[in-house]
Amino acid sequence: MRKVYYFLLIVLFGCISCEWQFTAGDDLIVKVDRYDRIQSLYLTTGDFSALQQMNTAYPMQTRTLIEDVLRIGKVDDQQINTKFLRFYQDSTLQALISEAEQQYASMDDINADFTKVFKYLREHIPGIEVPEVYAQIGSLDQSVIVGNGSIGICLDKYLGSDYPLYKNPLYGYSKSQLATMTRSYIVPDCAGFYLLSLYPMPHDRALSQQERDMHIGKIQWVINQAYGKHVFNTVYTRMVDRYMKSHNLTIDQMLRNNNYSEFRKTN
């Protein structure tokens, strides 16, 4: 089966094997798998046991990071471990690793938000699968990676809007982008991009920018409902809100409706 990954820049918005679990009463708990800690240990100390754990306990995450995020070679290349280690010896990347591990020493609040949001989604979108969620440290390329039933969080893209490195003109982040490169946007981004993978934009016709924005607005509206507050507040989320108040539709039906003109007619 062809692997599909969604690599998403910020433009819109530990346990070893258990990222989500069920407790008594089928009460869902979502917990971020701290792959980043094993990754950090190897990349800062060269600890061979950490590398072994990355390859044996996290083969999918390691392959995705090396081949699809960093794009430094194939995971079965005999020299890939050396390339991987050398890649992160850059002083900027070492600083990112240190900052990420310090800021995200605990992710209890994020786990709680993931649990809240996916409980809502599971209740309102029957049959939705709860993905595995893990954290990693990239190289300022992607923010969220969705594919094969998993969500990867690149912590290096969520170090705060005031993080000095982000303000370097070399990276060209706009003020609106910087505003979303914070801890509070991790769960909204991840849940939103996961929904986008389940309800993609139509590929059978060319979409206008307004139609693309409308599609994202539908997804962001759902995230607002899951949170019980306006995480996203745009003209498009407001259109969807008015549309849903005047139509007796399920969330699944609304997300599948790609006749974007209907949402504008309500307003």
Image (cartoon, rainbow, N blue to C red):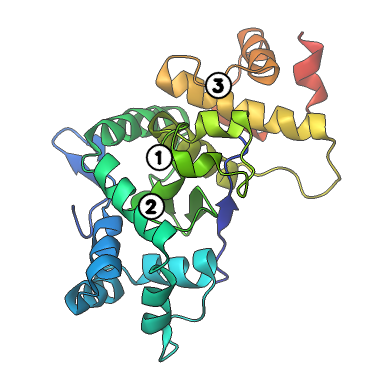
Coordinates of residue 190 in the picture (x, y in percent): 46, 40
Residue 257 seen = no
Amino acid type, callout 1: Leu
Residue at the spot 40% in from the left edge and 92% down from the top edge: 78
Question: Which three-letter amino acid code belongs to the residue tagged 3?
Answer: Phe
Q: Earlier in the sequence, mark 1 or mark 3?
A: 1
Q: Which mark is residue 232?
A: 3
Instruction: Tell me the quadrant of the picture where the N terminus can be found.
Output: bottom right
- Residue at x 45%, y 14% (from the top left corner): 229
Say above or below: 15 vs 54. Answer: above
Whether residue 160 appears in this view of the structure is: yes
Q: Residue at x 26, y 30 (%)?
A: 109
Check disc 2: other Cα within 10 Å, few if <14, some if 14-19, many if 20+.
Answer: many
Find residue 64 and report its horizontal and vertical position in percent.
46, 67
How far is mark 2 from mark 3, CA to CA? 28 Å
- Look at mark 2 in the image and give the residue it sits on: 96
